[in-house]
Image (cartoon, grey):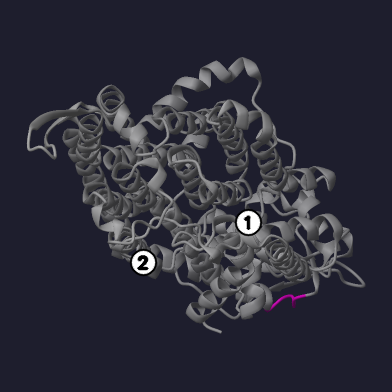
Amino acid sequence: MTTAPAAILTLMVLSAVGLFPAVAAVGLRWVTVPLLPLGGAVVAALAAAGFVAVGGTFMIWFAGLAVAGAVSVAGHWSARPEARPWRGRGRPVGARYRATGVIGALAVAATGGWCLRSLSAPAVGFDARAIWLMRGGWFLQPHHQLLFDMRAPSLVLYQSAYPPLVSASTAVAWSIAGNHSFRLGVVVVALLNACALAAAAFALVECGRTAAVRLAYPREQRIDPGPADGEPGDVLPLAPLVAGVVAAVLLVPVASGITGPFMTNGYADPIWSLAAVGAVAFGLQLQAGRFQRGATALLLVVAGMSKEEGTAIAIALIALVAVRAVATMAPGDRRRNLWRPVALAGLEVGAVALWPVVMRVIRARGATSTFAPAGVWSGRVRPTYDALVPYLHVVVLAVPLAIVGAVFLSRVRRAAGTANDGWGWAGLSVGLAGVGAVLVTDSGAIGPLLAGSVHRLSEFPALVGWWIVAVWAVVASGSVAAGRRRRNRRSRTAPAVTEGVTATGVRHDLTTTA
Amino acid sequence: MAGAVVAVVALCGLGVQSFRGDRTVGAQLAGPVVRNAEVDNAYYHCLDVQTRSLVAPGQTVSFTGTDPYSVITLLQAVGSWITVADPPSGATARLSLLYGQGHGCLGTVVVAYYAAAHGGPVVRVGSGDEVAGNGPPPPSPL
């Protein structure tokens, strides 16, 4: 089978496998579409971990976990009909709301397709040949051979112990298509990268839609389809809807430029960075809610099972998201339901930590990290800072926007349902701290390490910076609607003086307070 | 007013960066970049074909005594399908690379050493493909 049909077949298989988990997590939404193959990739990564730990064959594990996931979700829906995603929960409807979803989805998909044109160059990256794609073949070998490949010192590559998502997805592609080419692996990885980017970008469309609904309706009307005498969607303010779509579309080439050649040459850095920034968007920047939690959880696991830096930063983001969930609970709710965000965080950490634990149990080559002596760390800080700065110029724009936004637009931000900007900056700080720690403490010589890694390692913090800018664009676009809403509220609460005519024809001043 | 300013500045910043990002994407399709990728692919395909002329999938190989750079290069070319021997002494063939040969894959050839019943090992040189020029292949982005 040639590359294009093989890649399409692989995405279809991954999407089918990811269907039940993704729909259970996120529901039936536009953002579910790019999350389907990512859900399948997570199942593939879990299958790789199970295969390495226990034995059997990789594809039997993949099929088995797919069936188990589907049966579990179907059973859950059978036992709890209210959880079925097609029942509908009275989400806001209306022409503008629906049109924004359609236009946003199509625009993000089209822009993503345009930015994938670099796939026509047949590049295969150095690390893709040595680790990410090559290991896909190892997962298709017998179990005893795989264990030897992962352990033997003579095979020198300590990166063989890196998390399995990219290699496992490649193994799925090679197995089902019968096409064991690096070109197919590169194309499949690029398509998964594009899916992660589409999901992260679509968060801005959702941000705009949420802002429009919250700024148009009082709280009690937001989950109601609307009065019978007209489509309520028609009163949604246009500015945040448009700003959300525009920001989402612009973010696609922004991210493609930041990831550069690694987006389409088989490296694992884009997928963990894009999935992590999607998790920041849904978990730390948008309004808290059920589908946002589901999207965040799935994207965090994708990030954590893709690369070691992704594992570390995903675990930190899991903690951050859980803290936000607890901090934003009402006190009574916190007493009853504290276990929910903690349990969810525990499941996510369990999925992400599974592979590193398995690597240590089998004593894989490179399973334990080596660090530079603590005495030399201080000398590595300045070169690390100097190397990172050119990739983080977004901070020069994001910081002033955040300050002006915090001073003049915090009310608008709250009214629009967007999270406090501090959470997004906390996500960026986590990314910077993680990347900085990796570079400062690594045992490799600092010069070559920075030359060979800093572009890729800076992707996540740079992306979060641009997502912070984009959210401010959407929030700020709602300021007019927010001002109108405040004025409407004030006019409802102010004394209203009206003239009334009594039955005797005498005029009276009727002063009422609403 | 503040809202309008923030929205305009943010969207303009996104617009400028998206334009630069699109140019970065377009740069991946520049002639020299594509040619380097083609040479790189041809080099590793050549090593793969030469190795297949020496060992079949399922036959065990080892890299004992081969320098780490050669091991990495061979893994990149054939690591997804070869069977590495456990223990290495049980390998059908020991693989290595010879550089600067003037022919082969950018001057590199794959060599296999087979244990012989008597005397020294039997040496065979891979064949089946050639890439003209001198190696190593062009460096890829890191």
Looking at the image, residue A293 lies above or below residue A424? below
Q: Amino acid at mark 2?
A: Gly
Q: Which residues are magenta?
A: B53-57
In terms of secondary structure, where does tag 1 sit?
Answer: helix
Nearer the observer, A134 or A209: A209
Reading the image, the residue beneath label 2 is A113
Q: Which mark is residue A165?
A: 1
**Residue sitting farthest toward the right:** B117
Question: Please, which chain is the residue tagged with disc 1 on?
Answer: A
Name the chief secondary structure element in magenta: loop
**How many callouts does the rendering have?**
2
Residue A385: image location, x then y, percent: 43, 25
Categorize mark 1 by other alpha carbons within 10 Å: few (<14), some (14-19), many (20+).
Answer: many
Q: Amino acid at mark 1?
A: Leu
Please give the name of the residue rendered at 25% of the width and 48% of the height, measured from the top-left corner. A243
Looking at the image, residue A475 lies above or below residue A251? above
Residue B88: image location, x then y, percent: 85, 59
Q: Which mark is residue A286?
A: none
Nearer the observer, B25 or A321: A321
- Residue B85 in view: no
